[in-house]
Image (cartoon, grey):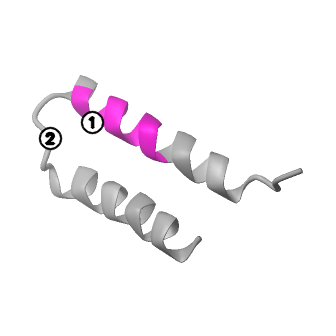
C-alpha cells in the first residue's frame, strides 16, 4: 500500500515540476496515477 501511495505522490510531484511537456501528457499521467490510487485504496471485497 505504501509503495503504491509513494508512486502516486511521486507522479504528482513530477507533474508539478513540469517533467512532462504538454498539457495532454500531464493530464494523461495524472489520470493514470489517480486511477491507480483509487484502485489500490478501494476496499477489496
In the picture as drawn, the residue positioned furthest to the front comes out as 45
CA neighbours of label 1 inside 10 A, class few (<14), some (14 to 19), many (20+) = some
Q: Which residue is drawn at 39% across and 41% down?
A: 30
Q: Residue at x 27, y 36 (%)?
A: 26
Q: Residue 13 placed where, x, y %?
A: 29, 62
**Horizontal arrangement in the rendering, residue 9 relative to residue 13 (left or right):** right
Give the prevailing secondary structure in the magenta stretch. helix
Tally of marks:
2
Disc ID at residue 11:
none
Q: Do the residues labelled 2 and 1 touch (CB within 8 Å)?
A: yes
Q: Residue 19 placed where, x, y %?
A: 12, 49
The residue tagged 1 is 26
CA neighbours of label 2 inside 10 A, class few (<14), some (14 to 19), many (20+) = some
Q: What stretch is highlighted in magenta?
A: 25-33
Q: In this view, does 27 lie above or below 12?
A: above
Res. 35 image quadrant: top right
- Pick the front one: 3 or 23: 3
**Horizontal arrangement in the rendering, residue 38 relative to residue 45 (left or right):** left
Q: Which residue is drawn at 59% across and 70% down?
A: 1
Q: Residue 39 placed where, x, y %?
A: 65, 46
Res. 31 image quadrant: top left
Q: Which residue is drawn at 43% across and 59% down?
A: 8
Res. 17 image quadrant: bottom left
Give the structural element (helix, strand or loop) at label 1. Answer: helix
Q: Residue 11 placed where, x, y %?
A: 33, 55
The residue tagged 2 is 20
Give the structural element (helix, strand or loop) at label 2. Answer: loop
**Horizontal arrangement in the rendering, residue 39 relative to residue 23 (left or right):** right
Q: Which of marks 2 and 1 is nearer the N terminus?
A: 2
In the picture as drawn, the residue positioned furthest to the right comes out as 45
Amino acid at each position: 500500500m505504501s509503495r503504491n501511495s509513494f508512486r502516486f505522490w511521486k507522479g504528482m510531484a513530477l507533474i508539478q515540476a513540469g517533467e512532462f511537456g504538454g498539457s495532454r501528457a500531464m493530464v494523461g499521467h495524472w489520470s493514470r496515477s489517480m486511477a491507480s490510487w483509487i484502485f489500490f485504496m478501494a476496499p477489496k471485497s
